[in-house]
Amino acid sequence: MYTINYDAGLNRVTVKVSEINKDNVNQYIEDFQKELEKVKPGFTGLTDLSEGKLFTMDVAEKLSPLGELSVQKGLTKWAYYTGSAVSKLQMKRMFGEVVDSFEKMEDAEEFLRN
């Protein structure tokens, strides 16, 4: 349903989501927090939601604190590759100015490099 990886060379957390729902959201939060223990200040993040389903309201509420937690750990930029205008709106609502959403993976990666 999802994968979370930390690349020490890039100092980047990469997440690929196919579905996070009420059955696995708590496990996702736990797994995400474990990856955050590895990051160095100034890290970036990239989430691929291109094949993912939109989050339900209750799941979105549970995930929202992860944005602030990431900032506390030293997040500088987080890019979402969504391919969906609705998903872009949902990410903006959940994480505010911490994230930027892109409809092309190349654009998301370029944003993180600059």
Image: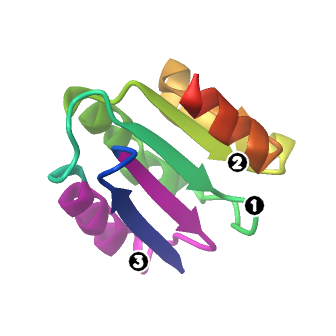
Q: Which residue is mark 1?
A: 50
Quadrant location of the C terminus in the rendered image? top right
* Classed neighbour count for the residue bearing mark 3: other residues with Cα under 10 Å, few (<14), some (14–19), many (≥20): few
Bounds of the magenta segment: 12-35
* Classed neighbour count for the residue bearing mark 1: other residues with Cα under 10 Å, few (<14), some (14–19), many (≥20): some
Q: Which residue is mark 2?
A: 81
Q: Residue furthest left?
A: 37
Q: Amino acid at mark 2?
A: Tyr
- The residues tagged by marks 1 and 2 sit, at their Cα atoms, a distance apart of 6 Å
Q: Mark 3 falls on what kind of element? A: loop
Q: Which residue is mark 3?
A: 24
Figure check: 27 above or below 54: below
Mark nearer the N terminus (3 vs 1): 3
Q: Mark 1 falls on what kind of element? A: loop
Q: Amino acid at mark 3?
A: Asn
Residue at 22 percent of width and 30 percent of height: 41
Residue 65 picture quarter: top left
Q: Is residue 31 magenta?
A: yes
Q: Amino acid at mark 1?
A: Ser
Residue 43 picture quarter: top left
Are the two marked residues, 1 and 2, in contact with CB atoms closer than 8 angstroms?
Answer: yes
Closest to the camera, between mark 3 and mark 1, is: 1
Residue 49 picture quarter: bottom right
Residue at 48 percent of width and 24 percent of height: 98
Are the two marked residues, 3 and 1, in contact with CB atoms closer than 8 angstroms?
Answer: no
- The residues tagged by marks 3 and 2 sit, at their Cα atoms, a distance apart of 21 Å
Q: Is residue 109 magenta?
A: no
- Identify which residue, 57 or 48, lies in the foreground: 48
Residue at 75 percent of width and 60 percent of height: 50
Measured from the top left, where is residue 70 in percent x and y? 30, 37
Residue at 75 percent of width and 49 percent of height: 105
- The residues tagged by marks 3 and 1 sit, at their Cα atoms, a distance apart of 19 Å
